[in-house]
Amino acid sequence: CETIGLSAFENCQALESASFEPGSQLKSIGDVRSANGDSGVFSGCISLKSITIPASCRYIGSNAFYGCTSLTDLSFEEGSQLEIIGWYAFMNCGLLHRIYMQNCSKLTRIMDKALYGNDEIYFLQMGATTPPMLGNNVFGVVGAYSVLKVPAGSESVYRAASGWNAFSSITAID
């Protein structure tokens, strides 16, 4: 399976975690081309706490994890091929405060409100040396204590990039 279709697990209220077989060939979680409010693959899965996105996944579609109010653990396998995070992909995931994307060196774009409505992002670790292009209101609340970790040598580029400069602390990954 290369794509998980729209609404595949929508509102699965008892689903607590999702994982993929080693060597998964998954290319897309939902449809990244649509911003029209289609239901996302895991949208409304209110018990979903963790997910590891397989390295082969290039796109996280619009609304993919919208309203996963228990989601606290989001990780990406080493060697991630992720390029785009779609509109509203992780919107209203109120407990998603720490996001580890250090394995996502190929990420080029994060669409509108992808992480909006998540109370506050405390920690975001990026793997791309060039800041991905951001849509409107990607992060929602980025507060005085929000920390952005980026690859060494990329700090000044992120500080100068629109949207990324909202983080008060931008430092190199240790």
Image (cartoon, rainbow, N blue to C red):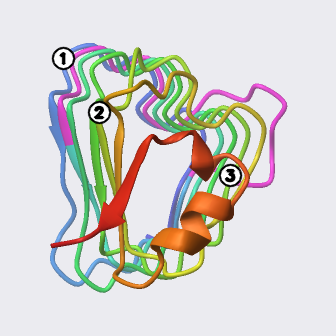
The amino acid type of the residue labelled 1 equals Ala
- Report which quarter residue 6 is drawn in: top right
Say few, some or many: other residues with alpha carbon within 10 Å of mark 3 (under 14 / 14 to 19 / 20 or more). Answer: many
Identify the element where label 1 is drawn: loop
List x then y, in percent, for residue 130. Answer: 59, 78
Distance in Å between CA atoms under marks 1 and 3: 24 Å
Q: CA distance from mark 3 to mark 2?
A: 28 Å
Q: Which mark is residue 14?
A: 1
Name the mark on residue 130. none
Q: Is residue 44 left or right of residue 39?
A: left
Is 93 on the left-hand or right-hand side of 131?
Answer: left
Q: Give whichever of 156, 84 is nearer the camera.
A: 156
Residue at the disc numbered 3 = 31
Crowdedness near tag 1: few (<14), some (14–19) or many (≥20) residues, C-alpha within 10 Å: few
Label 2 SS: loop
In magenta, the rendered stretch is 30-50
